[in-house]
Amino acid sequence: MKPILAIILLVFLLNPLQAQILSPAGNNSLTGISKERINKLDAMLEEAVSRQQVPGLVAMVVKDGKIVYHEAKGLSDMAFGKKMEKNSIFRIASQTKAITSTAVMILWEEGKFRLDDPISKFISEFKNPQVLQNFRYGDTTYTTKPSSKEITIRHLLTHTSGLGYGVIDGDERMKMIYHKAGVVDLFTTENVTIGESVKRLAKLPLHHEPGAKYTYSEGLDVLGYLVEIISGMPFDVFLKERIFDPLGMNDTRFYLNEAQAPRLVTVHTRKDNQWVSFPVTFYDPDYPKTGAKAFFSGGAGLSSTVEDYAKFLQMYLNGGIYNGKRILSPTTIETIMTNQVGDLLGDGGKDYGLAFGLVDAKGVQVGGIGSLGTFDWGGYFNTQYFAAPQEKLIGLIFKQTSGAGNGDETGWKFRQMVFTLVE
């Protein structure tokens, strides 16, 4: 292990804030944070909304467990002129993945499996995987060749399984194969379960042999089903009982109740130089509050608030504990926060662990994305988060846009500016 990385990992093991819970910092106690730079950050976000680069947003910055910035700007629904609120609920899409990974590691800590166990040990349909060889666009038929390796749980956690992502896959052939097979890629209002979709997925060819490449995939949906099999509980119930309730994440759910539904932010897109509601396409944007409410997508299904997700990230910064509730051990987090994919992501400044993207030495050199060991990810509807163990710093900026935009640069500007707040 590189010496600098070892030092960063010790932050998780020796963190003096293990019982830290989120609390307001107060106007006179912004310890270690520049109030002047907070004002500049706020002005940048205000300008972006006033210039209609984004309809609305909620942003939060946490330092040492203290909320030093939490603001809502703009509108949550342009058509109705509905104001964005700090407790507005957002579809967090792929930010679901880190929560699913955490659920997997909870069961791993209980000795239910090894990371390099084949997934076919638990889901037999994945036995004897095949790799795509030839494809006919005329009738979507294809030939395959046997894979020399089985898909393991580690492969699924790290997007190296060879599985694809259907409608958002970079390979047109996989899009067609997944569609024809009836695999649910992201979200749905239909009456289908993750078990049904995963079993269809298991019969389909892989992009490549497991472990050969990093290919963003539905691996976390497979693992959501694995959690159901091992725990004997519906996936949504497991998350509620083992993660959400202990952390106080009361607004993080796959589907919203009647009290929560009005707080769901509308998905917007640009049309005729205006922000309008995103239409029904391959999915219904109202999926969190309508339809069968039966599909618990481990890769993309949850909705949440900025504050709820900050609690989840603070648990990681605390070494696996929050509000006196132990979710993971510090040594498990050490494993999660190490590069698991070697050089498969290239040399762009990011590695990938078992739940998050990780800023490496090249990323520090490039600048603007944080210190060594900063972990992050984002979501399909323009939500982003990052957390830095060195500074004990968390940044979150949630929006709800899809398709055509209007020059929104708040994502990279917010992250770059947050790391300059620390004095």
Image (cartoon, helix red, strand yellow):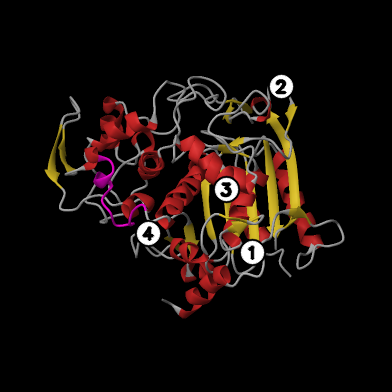
- Residue at image coords 27%, 25%: 180
- 1 and 3 marks in contact (CB < 8 Å): no
Query: Counting other residues with Cα less than 10 Å from the Cα at mark 2, is it few (<14), some (14-19), or many (20 or more)?
Result: few
Is the residue marked by circle 3 packed among few (<14), some (14-19), or many (20+) residues within 10 Å? many
Residue range corresponding to the magenta coloring: 112-123
Could you give the CA–CA distance between mark 1 and mark 3, rounded to whole angstroms?
24 Å
Q: Which mark is residue 345?
A: 4
- Secondary structure under tag 4 reads loop
Residue at mark 3: 384
Please tell me which residue lies in front, 19 or 220: 19
Residue furthest right as drawn: 28
Badge 2 marks a residue whose secondary structure is: loop
SS assignment for the magenta stretch, majority: loop
| Disc nearer the start of the sequence (4/1) | 1
Q: Amino acid at mark 2?
A: Phe
Say which quarter of the image contains residue 46: top right
| Residue found at the far bottom of this picture | 3
Q: Which numbered marker is on residue 344? A: none
Q: CA distance from mark 2 to mark 3?
A: 26 Å
